[in-house]
Structure formats: structure tokens, C-alpha cells
Amino acid sequence: MEVSPLCVILVKSDSKGDRLLFRYPFVHYESPETLSKTKRNPYALPTAEDLLQTSVVPISTISKRGLTGFSDEVLSSLFAVKNDLCNRKFELKVNDVRFVSHPTQLQLRNKQTEKDDTGIMLINIVFSLSALASHSVVKCYHDLSKRIGIILRHEEKRCGYISEQTQTMMAAHDDSCTNNNGAAFEVILQKCTLAANIKKLYEDLCSTGLVNIRLNSWIPLSFCLPQKAHQWHLKGKLVEPEDIDRCLLALRPYHSLLLLHPVQHLINFTSLDSSPSLVQMLSQYSPMKNLQKLAKDSDLSLKHVFELTAHLVYWAKATVIFPVCSKNNYTIASDAPISLRSGLIDMYSTFFPGGNLIRALSEFSLPTSLGQITNPLCNPSPEPDLIKSIIWMLQHHLLVQLHTYVQYMPTDNGISSTKCSRQYVKTPPRTSSVLSTSFPEPSRTESESGTSTVSEAQDFPKHFALESITFASTDDDKHNYQEELLHDFPTEESTQIFKIPATNNPEDLKLFARLCRKGYFQGNHHLEEIMYLENLPRSQLLQLLDKFRDVLVTYETEDPAIAMFSSSSYL
Amino acid sequence: MNSIEKNNLSGVKEGQIRCIFFCEFHHTAGPIISCQFPEHFISKELFDSISVYIITKAELQKSTITVTLQDYKFLGFPVRIDNKNYARNAFHFNLCFVCDSDARTVQYESVVTKLSEYLMSMEIESSFLSIGQSKEKLSPLLEKVMEDLNTKGECALLQGPIATHLKVCQIRSDPNPVLDHQVPIFIKELPPNQWDLTTQQVTPYINGFNHIARIASLSDVDNNLVKACVQNLVYYKVVALVPLFQYSNIYCTTPKLRTLAQDIDLQRRCLQYVARCNRQIPNLRDVFRTYAAMTRGTTIKDICNRFNMANMRINERKLVQFGVLEGLIRRVHKYPIALGDNTDLQKTFTGNFNIDEICCAAGITTQQLEEKLEKDPNIILLHK
């Protein structure tokens, strides 16, 4: 889908009527159809058949990626909207073109005649797009038009910028010969800074989707069209603002920032009055650090680092990854643009002389961690080159990281269907009264006999009995703590869990119950997240998963939150 | 396709028609709404603010025009009939549909155009619109159109000298081209429409296991015709395409797998689908465990060896099919890339084609190809 604008149009409307002041690009492609239409004999009689015949091909008003078929008069009458439609979103679709704008009313600052101070003018910056443009693209363009409107209103109030610019434009139109608008537009482009701004705006939107202009050489306007801006690193994929929002909502302190450009490039990109904390953060940047560490190192609050990250991601300057460490499992991204003809191979070998991208990638055909590639015997710490290579491949979306997710499956039918009524029917806790019944008091007769002749034969069963009692009591204890720990689990689930030998260990069962209760085993949290949130070492968690493997199923997949740039199709 | 799908891919809702109105250019009063259903839906003030987009200049005649305001969207098709008999030598009118502003309305464009052309021919034939009392005649017509389109998605206007049939057609994006090695599979029953001859000949061979090239040879239909036919069925969402099943295939889990543990309805469908026979339904834990075991590097053969599929009452072919269709798992393809100087090999093994495609084009089995590739150290297999 094409998201670049076809044309940017500037229309004004005031007490003297409406007029199209400028449009860019203005090179006129006269299509043969419109010519034949206009040259129709006015005296020809219309025949009924003629009227009823519908053109087979729908009329298209897009040609060579430009807007055609509309005269300036028609456009100006369309966009000089009625008062009721001012200062709100305006959207009009004609055949296969969609026009989006935010008509802005402004009070003219009258320099010449102080008495006539009621001059109100309507300024409308209209973007014409292909009709296929999605709602989100339309929304972005509307936002842009609105912002320009606000700036122009301010500039008019401050120094009468609009009055001056519109007068120059009108004069140019009046001076030029009646029908040759191209010449007038040429003059306007040379004379008016506003026209030059519109030209720059259009070119930026078409090329990078990043706009950075200064209106009236005074007010900066920065704008990012995410659907376009992300094209440079994700070819052919349309990144919607909602996708980015979703990714940013999933941002966690253990994630880390991965810049897509060298740091110096970003520092150059930021404008003079940019936030100093951004520079501060970039100075401490490393893809090996998580956001929490980055915040600490750059002496910023975590929330602010999140905001800065969000900003960089939105502007297609960075993505979010899990910090590069030796335990990370990487594999080749499903849509990695790998072929002999893609330029990536050459780019790789210029970055890493002697390296071959295909060979480097083939290491990750099977999910592989950094620790596995480096030989632990001769070189315990991973080679810096390898890390660089992985970071490069992550920047180009060739690799994705796989995480292990855990699903709790206590019974054959999965989680009990009566999950909502997860109220364990509490059986009264078994009291130690059992002890007294199973271990009868030494019979009175025996004691009464008073004889100390306790035979060995008598002793034996007693001893046995004692042993069995101790057994019974530990078993009983076990059931006690088990039930206490799993008191809110349905009976069918807990009976399955008790079959696992590891439940004999109260520590294990306690940990299991805690993690389960917190909902970590619903496939929403990967191991690293559980480790972070619960402050657990990896080995302990892995041991637990292994011990409870009868009720816990693990699987490996991408983190849907941050892998959205590479696998948005799964969402 | 009779059924209207309310949800489309982008998640934007399909709009119901809220109102239909007919407006004309009155020779003294200017643009007015002469008839609308329901009554008083569009106020005069609202209409005045947008009348310029409804009774338009000559250049915009016969264009589909959509204006979006804060609450409503207006779809129109302005028409002008030139004739000396009219007060201003021309009769302007426009029939507009009104929908919610956040709804998708592309599907109504052709309906609006067709209805306008119907009214135009009625007007030319019998001065249906201009003769006066248009309100009495039009009002029931508009009501019928709106009710029928909103409920059934189609409407037949058979009164009067001319008949017309209106139908709301969903606009969907074009389906991807179909490739030789893909396997079509029905995802719902083929609607009992009068399908074309090719489709009639091809559909008996669509069973979820035959790939396109095989279907072409079995049905004795040209390969490209089969592709076109299957593509058409994919467009109507009758058929989905899955990768060819082989025991040497590798699949991996997707983040969607977790829905299987939570969605009761999905579980029920899954267990029924993957069962070996209808009477013995496998249990969910086994199914989930088998899916979870599908990782990069594990072939279906390995999985069959590890688990006893017959004991678990799971049909592994169906298991894979269901997983792929529902997006729980996806196929991991192997892409051979030829490094070195062998330009002949580099023509085939560019990294753009996976092993399935190459095998299908060359007519050899995967095993044969993989054996050959293994011998050559300059060829690298990438799994992705």
C-alpha cells in the first residue's frame, strides 16, 4: 500500500472568495480523457443511450503517482469548507483519491488598516492520498495538517505571516496569464517561504516519512509518518502506530534498546533544543544493558528512559530487544530477506572483513545461544566479534530470539474447566487425634501387672508400630502442608500434582504453588521474565520445570511483544 | 457468496447503512433533500454544510464521492441529466447512503452507483423523479433497499418498467499467487453455487494432501488453470493453503499456541479434528505436548518416534494440518544457498526458493535433493 501523498494543496477562503493558492507537485499531466471531455461540442444533443452507458473502466484520478483530472477551481471549491466543518477533521474521497485535512480558521492580523480587524480567513492544507490509505494513515495526515494549521495561526498572530504569504501568492496568480498555472506556481515557489516549506514537506514525506522543517524560519515542525518511516529497515511491511503502541506497552525494565544507527548519527539528528536527557542516555547506551541499568547509568528515572525508548522506536531509530547475553537463544527470522542478490551480504562483509553473512547465519539454523557457539574450553568469554555480528544481524531483523514459555497442564483435559469457581472445598484439617487412635495407650492390664518382665517378643511389635506411626505422621504432615499450599487448587488438579515425587519437598512445592498462583505458567511469561519478576536464578527455575514436567509443558517461541517487527502476522 | 462477513482483516467494522436519502437541485430552492428514510435523520443544517459535495460541479459528476464528518459518512454518486424540459435544462440528483463515520464503506460504492443509474434510467424513461410526488414513490423504495441491504446484503427492485438487483460485495485484498508445491484444503463446505467447469473438475481432488501440481495431473486440468481456480477459492475463503506434508518436515510453535490451552472452543475443534477416529478423542495434554515438542530441528518423524501417536489416538497429519491452519505452528522451510563460484548452482540456490519449490520444479524427492546438497560444502541450508 502506498502511503506517500499524491499532492499537497493549499487553499484559502475569506470574504473575497476561495482560491487555490499553491499545490505541489504542480507539473501538470494532461490526460487525454479530460481533454476530450472539455472539448465536447456544447450544442451536441445528449442521447439517452449515451447517458446510460457507464464507463467500463472506473475513472481514475491518479496518474504517474500524481493527481490529475481536477482543475484548481474545483479543488478550491471543494476545500473551502463551510463554517460548520472548520477546525475539525475533514475527509473526502473522490473515486480513488482521498483528501485529508484540518481546515483552520484564523484571525488575520491587519497591518494596513487597523479599523478593519474582523478579517477571518480559512486556511486548509490538504493532503491527497490514494483511497486505499488506511484509517491510521489518514489519522497521521490529519494530525500533520492540524499541526501546520496551529503553527500558521500562531505565526499570523505573531507577525502576519499568512496575510503576507497569501498576498504574494495571489499577486503571482493574478500576474500570470490566466490559464497557465504552472508558471504562477513556479514564481510562488521562488518567492514564498510557505510554498518552499510545502515542497520540502512533500519531498520528505515521499522519501523518508520524517519531516523536519521550520515554518517561517521560526517554528520547527517535526513529524514522523511511522507507516513510511519504518520502511527503510522493514521493507514491504507496514508498521502501524498501534503496533508500536502495543510494543511499547509491553516494555519491561529487563528489555534493552537496540539502536539502528550509530550513536553519532542520532546525536546529529536531534535538534538543538532536544531533550538533554536523550543525549545523556545515548552516551551510556549499550545493547548489552537492560533499560533498568541504562537508567541507572545515565542517572535518569526508569519511566523517562521508557519514554525516550518509545520516542526512538516510533521514529524508527531503534527497536527493543532482550539484552544480548550468552544464554539467549537465537534463530533465523522467518522473513529474513536472505538471498544472493540482496545487498545485505556485501554490507556484512564491509562491516566484518572476511566474514560471510550466509555462513554466519547458518550457525543459527537451529536455535543456538551465544554460549553454545563459543567453545567454553579455550575461550570462556564470547568473542567480541561474534557479539557484534549478532547485534548487526539483530539490527537487520535477520535473527529472532526464542524464549521458553511454560504452560500449566495438570490434567489430561488441560486446566480444569471449572476455573472460574476455583474454590477448593476445604476438608477439615486432619488433627493429630489420629495419633491417639493408631497408637493405643499401653493397656492397663499390662501396666497393672506391674511386671517389668517385658519380653522381647512384646517389644518387637511395639517397635514396628512406632515406626509405622512415624511414617504415618510424616505422611500426614506432608498432606497438611500440601493442602495448605494448594488449598485453592481444584481437587482433580491437586491429586495430579501430588503424584509427582517432588511434592515431597516442601520448598519445591511451595515455589511451584507460588509461581502457579501468580499465573506465570499460562504461556504469557517467558523464563527470563519469571526470573526477573521473582528474582530466581535460572538453574533453580529449570530444576523446578524439570521436576514438575508432568504438569508443566514448555515450548519455545518468539516474544510476541517485542518480535512484533519481525512477526506481526501472528498477532 | 451469500454470507456477509462482518469482520474483515483490518479489524475495522463493516458498516450498516444508517440512512438513505435522495436529494435534488431544486430550480429555486437549490439543493434539497426531497426524500429520506428514516425521516428527519439528516438535519437541514447538516445537509447545507455538505451540499457542495453532494450536488457538485460538473467536473465531479458521476464520481463516487464519500465525505466523512464527525459522526457520519456520506456516500454519493452525483448525476446530471441534461434535457430542455427541465426548469434549468438539467436535472441534478444524488442518492446518498449514510453510515457511521468509523465504518468501512467501500463495499457500498458499487451499490450506490448502480442504484443511481437505476433511478436515472427510470427518470429518463418515465420522469419518475422529476414529475412531483417523488416522495410518495421513493420513500418505500428507499426503505426496502435499506432494510434488505442491512439484513440480507442484497435487494431486488422489480417494480416498474425496469428491474435491478443490488448486492453488497465485500472488497478483499487479492490473494497471493498460488505455487506448485502448496496444498489446498477446504476450510468450510463448498457453497452449492453453480461453479465453473474447471472448479467442478478440480474440487474433488482437493483433500488436504494433494499439492497443486498433483491435482493438475489427477484432474487433467492445466496447471495454471488449477492455480487460478484455487486462488479464486482462496479469495472466497473456502480454501486455505498449507505446506505439503512430509515426515521430514520441520515445524515450530508460534506464540499463538497458548490460545490452545485457554480457548475451550478451539480445544474442542482441535481434538475432534486430530482424532484418529471419531469415537476415540485424544486428550488435550497429549496434543499440547506434541505441539510443544515441535521445535526447529525436530522432524515429524522424530516426533512420531518419540511419542506413540497411535496410543495417543492422534493422527499426525491432521495434527499438523490443524496447527498450520490455526496458526499454532508454522512450517520451517529450508533455503539452500550456493556460495563459491559455481554460477549454475547459484541460479537455483539463491536463497529465494525453499527445498519444496525446488523439488517440485525439478521433479525429485526431498531426500534425493538433500543428499546432493549435503555432499557439496559450498551449499548452505538456512532454516527459517
Image (tube, coloured by chain):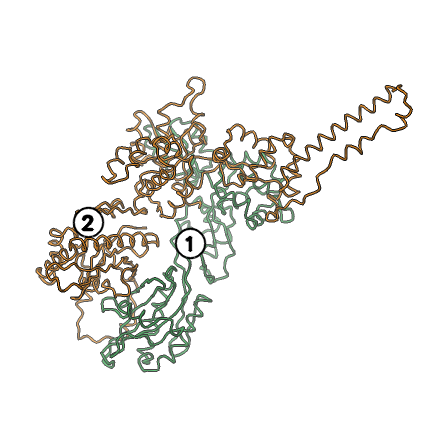
Mark 2, mark 1: which one is toward the viewer?
A: 2
* Res. B71 image quadrant: bottom left
**Which tint is chain A?**
orange
Dot 2 falls on which chain? A
Report crowding for label 2: few under 14, some 14 to 19, many 20 or more residues within 10 A (C-alpha).
some
Q: Is mark 2 on a helix, strand or loop?
A: strand
Q: Is mark 1 on a helix, strand or loop?
A: loop
Chain coloured green: which letter?
B
Dot 1 falls on which chain? B
- x, y (%) of residue B90? 24, 76
Return the residue found at the far top.
A378
Gap in angstroms between the C-alphas marked 2 and 1: 37 Å
Is disc 2 in the same subunit as disc 1?
A: no
Return the residue found at the far right.
A449
* Res. B143 image quadrant: bottom left
- x, y (%) of residue B102? 38, 59
Q: Which mark, residue A178? A: none
Residue B325, relative to residue A450: is it above or below? below
Residue to which mark 2 is pinned: A215
Residue A405, relative to residue A183: is it above or below? above
Q: In this view, does A266 lie to the left or right of A109?
A: right
Residue to which mark 1 is pinned: B11
Between B325 and A47, which is closer to the camera in this rendering? B325
Residue A475, relative to residue A428: is it above or below? above
Between A448 and A121, which is closer to the camera in this rendering? A448
- x, y (%) of residue A185? 13, 55
- x, y (%) of residue B151? 46, 67
- The three-letter code of the residue at mark 2 reads Leu
Q: In this view, does A302 lie to the left or right of A432?
A: left
